[in-house]
Image (cartoon, helix red, strand yellow):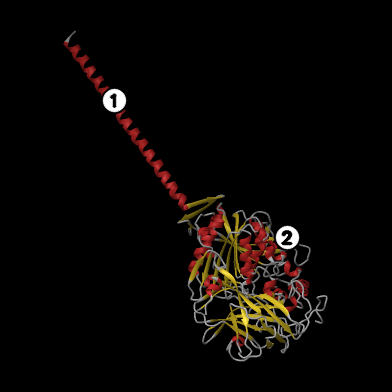
Amino acid sequence: MSKKNLVMIFSTIVVLVFIMLLSIQSLNINGNEQTQEDKLKEEKITDLNIQTEKESEQTTNMDNVEIQVSENKTQPAYSYSDAIIESVFVETTVDSDNDGNFDRIHANIIRPKETEDGLKVPVIYEITPYMYGLNPLTFHEVNVELNAVDENGKAKGRPFSGPEELDFPGTYDDYFVPHGYAVVIAEGIGTALSEGCPTIGDENEVLAASSVIDWLNGRAKAFSEDGQLVSADWATGNVGMIGMSYNGTLDNGVAVTGIEGLKTIVPIAAISSWYDYYRANGAVVAPGGYQGEDTDILADAILTRENPEVCNEVVNELEHTQDRVTGDYNEFWDDRNYLNEVKNINASVFVVHGLNDWNVKTKQFSQWWDALGKNDVPRKLWLHQDGHKNPKRIRENEWYETLHKWFDYWLYEIDNGIMDEPMVDIQREDSTWKIEDNWPAEGAVSTTLYLNHDPNIQTGMVSLQSSSNNQKNSITLIDDPMVQAEVLVANPEESNPNRIVFMTNELVDSVRISGTPEVSIRASLDQPVSNLTAILVDYSKTSSKIVTRGWMDPQNINDVNKSKPLDPNQNYTFTWDMQPDDYVFEKGHRIGIVFIASDFEYTLRPPAGKKLTLFPEKSKVILPIVGGSDALKW
């Protein structure tokens, strides 16, 4: 073989080896690149998982709802200025004006603009009879003689809250719409642009209010102003009701229907039984500040629809069946007692009430709260020291924060821990807030205090021990309905023929009551009928303060449903409750109980002169004292 050929073969082998080395290197490089790519993919998957976990903290999905959540709270992700505002007329299932057609109620809606693109949101809903304010009021005459019943229980012879500043629009909507809620405010039947007639808290008003929830869940029809069908396809169906006074009262009424879709209600200063708004133990009693009002007066006040004259017959029926003559509980009031159906509630309830609310009195929240507990309804309670007032004006930041968590939990199912918190927030007399597990306060015990009277001393004594049952020892008062209670409780050691006063000695330690005080007296009347009023008073060295009070028609001695005739000058035992309260009597003060007959601000005012004779040693007051009798030292 020639040298040239050997060179060529060698060169070819070198080239082949070189090519093989290049191929091996290329394979190694590609293999390394693949490994790196796999690593990157794994890192991306890991990052994606981490991001997904993070996003799960930021986004909640529920029936096509997507909202931004941070720290277990919905965030303001939607523009309020771009929100959609619309108006509809919802067809109800009632015909309260008897025109042969179902009433339609008017509702205004504001919702995030994203609901036009498929976003579905829950609804915060309020219904009010006050959208157009109130008509001028003409009250019943209260300076009248009381009616005594005959043997058959027949008479011989012959709320209200003012127009509160509306919660919607402009308060809750500008807060909650950016957080992914819609807000609906409707007008009660017979008011503003709604059809029908106001019937004051009965089934007609409740079912009309419920129709909006039915529409939001696709079970009812709504129409535009020009008569076109309007759907609520933007709504999840989850609804929370809120409102104050009459507005909150309708929340209670709707809740006891058990309607599907209502997840929670927030009744503020709301009525649970209309009888206890206008009556007390058989006595005709006014809401604070509105002497002479009754259901017919309230109906006339809120009857702001067009052609209100079509409701004349409905209002006349209210006046006829409410029975201002005997004050007895009857079918009319039973139809307006939401306590009857608490067992039907499927929603949670966040109750708010003022401990000094003399319009919607404290019995309304107390009996409601108790019934909710007995029926295992999820609940929360705020009690403040003001009167008929919205908590946003008392504790604004905490109110919005708590309400936000409440709606997030019940309408978006965000587990934010609010149901693990103590149930009760209560404001004390010094304006500080305390949290407690329930109400009345733990350790509150019905404690009997006995009344004693020395004929030689003007003021009777309150004692933990009963004295001898000497019924001959008596003390009298003469009714003067035109003297106000604040005057009658003042200066307890001075002689005053229009009241009877009993006091403890000065307290060694502070004493807290929490619950419902009661009184039981042995007494006689010189006439067949009278008013009876008991007043619990905090006496300091220089002043007197009415803590709570309660009223009774003595003719309802056995039954609030039926009056019975009383014999003049015969001794009877009369027992009745006062308005529930939570109050601390300070060290050095005295607990007082004052008896009068008529109460200028609340009861009817018959001619003066009726006499009550009370037998102290057979009479007592029962106070719900935290710590019981052991807490009383003087």
The disc placed on residue 331 is: none
Which of 271 and 482 lies nearest the eye of the viewer?
A: 482
Could you tell whether 248 is left or right of 157 in the image?
left
Residue picked out by circle 2: 93
Q: Is residue 572 above or below residue 50?
A: below
**Is residue 138 visible to us here?**
no
Query: What is the total number of numbered labels drawn onto the structure image?
Result: 2
| Closer to viewer: mark 1 or mark 2 | 2
Q: Is residue 3 left or right of residue 622?
A: left
Q: What is the distance, in whole Å, between disc 1 and disc 2 at their CAs?
A: 84 Å
Q: Is residue 447 left or right of residue 226?
A: left
Amino acid marked by disc 1: Ile
Q: Determine the image quadrant of residue 532.
A: bottom right
Quadrant in which residue 470 is drawn:
bottom right
Residue 605: where, in percent of width, then height? 71, 85
Residue closer to the observer: 331 or 584:
584
Q: Residue furthest front?
A: 468
Placement of 472 over or under 403, stated as above or below = below
- Please tell me in which quadrant of the rendered image residue 98 appears: bottom right
Secondary structure beneath dot 2 equals loop
Q: Residues within 10 Å of mark 1 (few under 14, many from 20)?
A: few
In this rendering, position of residue 291 left or right of residue 527: left
Sequence order check, earlier mark of 1 and 2 = 1
- Badge 2: few (under 14), some or many (20 or more) residues near its Cα, within 10 Å? some
Amino acid type indicated by mark 2: Thr
Q: Which residue is mark 1?
A: 24
